[in-house]
Image: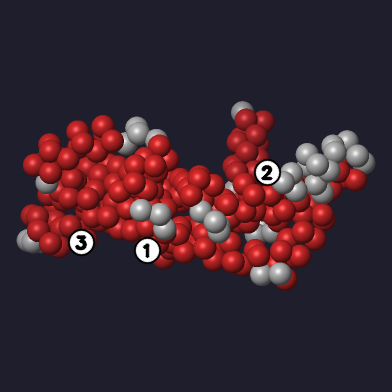
Amino acid sequence: MGETKKYIKNRVAFLDLKVPGYAPVIGIAGLLLLWEIVCRLGWVAPLYLPAPTAILAAGWEMLTKGELLQNLGASLYRIVLGYLLGASVGIIVGLLLGFSRWADAIGSPILYSLYPIPKIALLPLIVLWLGIGELPKVTIIALGVFFPVVINTFSGVKNVDSVLIKAAVSFGSNHFNVIRKVILPGALPVIFAGLKLAAGTSLLLLVAAEMIAAQHGIGSMILHYGNLMITTKLMVGILVLSMLGLLLNRGLQWLENKLLPWK
């Protein structure tokens, strides 16, 4: 019995260990060090996998020449505009589907029939409709963001505990206050899960759209240097995308912590 209690106590103490804030840095630094060693020892040809230091040098060269900032600016414009548009419409439509049985009955079949279609497959048709320019790229990103956000918003509203809604109504809350103070706070964790999922989708569609129909942007830059087999500059684009994904995720996590302090 004494050994069992001791084991449980040690197990609980292990689970309660606090992870220091620099732990993620250790993981990334270790990966980069291993990568550099592998390249320095010649285990992989530089054409296939350039060393991190070579990628850093290429990135600095592209930065000083203005090439990197030009492509990054074009991509940021598209992804920010497309993400905000798709997320805003997705939340509004998801709330409408969740609140209204009529909207659910009419809109859900349409939503779930369109969701499985690969959004990038629609790009030629969208270009035909909207012409060549920024609008088709922003639209395809917005479409990719819209579906995960609207589905998660709809699920979040539907899964709010009905007991809480009935309690609010019993204490005299009107319809607007029930939505604002009970349903929305209850659905927000699921909505943020959809927003985070949509962030990754937006990056995928950004790169695909820029590779197909853009002269500037990170995706276009990656395709250009891939065709020229300049892998150092190609890897600069991939690492920039990785950093964009990390920043998007961290930004959404910060916003979630601010809006959901109880979580």
Q: Nearer the viewer, residue 63 or 95?
A: 63
Q: CA distance from mark 2 to mark 1?
A: 45 Å
User: Answer yes or no: do the residues labelled 3 and 1 have beta carbons within 8 Å?
Assistant: no
- Residue tagged 2: 227
Give left or right: position of 13 versus 102.
right
Mark 2 packing: few (<14 Cα in 10 Å), some, or many (20+)? Answer: few
Instruction: Note whether residue 97 is visible.
Output: yes
- Of all residues, the one furthest to the right in this rendering is 41
Q: How many marks?
A: 3
Relative height, residue 152 to residue 87 (above, below): above
Quadrant of res 67: bottom right
Q: Amino acid at mark 3?
A: Arg
- Residue tagged 3: 180
Q: CA distance from mark 3 to mark 1?
A: 13 Å
- Counting residues from the N terminus, which is met first, the one under dot 2 or under dot 3? 3
Residue drawn at 69 percent across, 59 percent down? 22
Give left or right: position of 80 versus 154.
right
Task: Specify the quadrant that holds the C terminus.
Answer: bottom left
- Residue tagged 1: 259
Q: Amino acid at mark 2?
A: Asn
Residue drawn at 64 percent across, 49 percent down? 224
